[in-house]
Amino acid sequence: MEDLKFTRDMAQLAVLQRIELADKFLMKVRKLFGRYLFSKLFSKYLINKRKISQNYLKVINNEYQNIEKFLNDGQKILSIGGGIGGLELLILKKFPNTKIDLIEKNYISEKVKYGWDYKNNEAYNNLTITKKFLNLNGIDTNKYSIYDIDKKNLPIKSYDLIISLYSLDYHYDFNIYVKYLRSVSNKNTKIIFDTIRPDFFFNIFEEISVIKENESTVHKSKRIKCTVFK
Ligand SMILES: C[S@@+](CC[C@H](N)C(=O)[O-])C[C@H]1O[C@@H](n2cnc3c(N)ncnc32)[C@H](O)[C@@H]1O
């Protein structure tokens, strides 16, 4: 795959969303000056845009390969917390008849924290930049729609695949979405997300399989593929 077209704003969001893209120097700066200055300034101006873009592509390519077997052309896909949309970009490039709805938050927290957030106040995205990122990298606007979770106008349709990497039940409670997810899935819908408590989902879904183990991320978690709500 060719290099991504990336602006500094996009590189900043990629670093905030994928802290593993920050090098040792940047992590030291974060420790020294604190989360506020890191989130506002250093994550934007102390980064090597080209390097971040190349590493982001590598990371996202690995994620793509992990879920590739669940992808087909023409699917209706829902993405929850997809960030700037790297994974969605790779899917839409590969499958010309697929459409994706992206649900995200539209702000960057004052001091980005990466723990479990019961109130679900933490966010690190900008929906205008997500749109720019997809368009700049050659995706037609009619292939995707972007929804702000805080505007409460979520799309209602039946999806083939629902994906949430390192977002739903990794940073905030699955229950925030459970009613909505029930309403937009059917018995064939595959729901893929990273969770810090995989066993909890045996009571919620008929079928669960682990498709990835995340040992070196902020939380130790598992990526599960679930089908059919009980
Ligand atoms: C750790 S990042 C992961 C981004 C992307 N999925 C990836 O793998 O690179 C978590 C994302 O979830 C988003 N987020 C937080 N709360 C959310 C919510 N209630 N609904 C949708 N997205 C949310 C954040 O803004 C952030 O972009």
Image: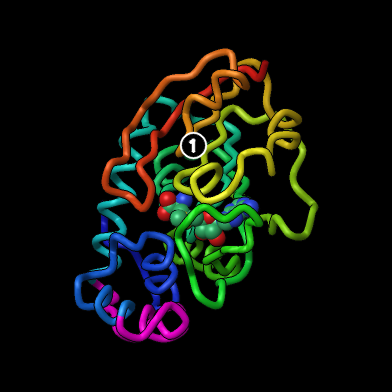
Q: Is residue 86 magenta?
A: no
**38 part of magenta stretch:** yes
Tell me what residue is drawn at x 75 percent, y 34 percent. Answer: 179
Residue 140: in sight, yes or no?
no
Which kind of residue does numbered mark 1 sit on?
Phe
Q: Which residue is mark 1?
A: 193
Does 205 sit above or below residue 67?
Answer: above
Between 149 and 36, the one nearer to me in the picture:
36
- Determine the secondary structure under disc 1: strand
- The residue sitting at 24% across, 77% down in the picture is 28
Q: Residue at x 28, y 82 (%)?
A: 29
Secondary structure mostly seen in the magenta stretch: helix
Front residue of 210 and 117: 117
Q: Is residue 22 left or right of residue 168?
A: left
Q: Is mark 1 within 8 Å of ligand 1?
A: no
Q: Quadrant of the C terminus?
A: top right
**Image height of 181 relative to 12, above or below:** above
Q: Quadrant of the rendered structure where residue 7 is?
A: bottom left
Residue at 48% in and 30% down = 73
The magenta span reads 32-50
Please state which of residues 128 and 117 is positioned toward the viewer in this rendering: 117
Q: Quadrant of residue 4?
A: bottom left
Q: Note whether residue 178 is visible.
A: yes
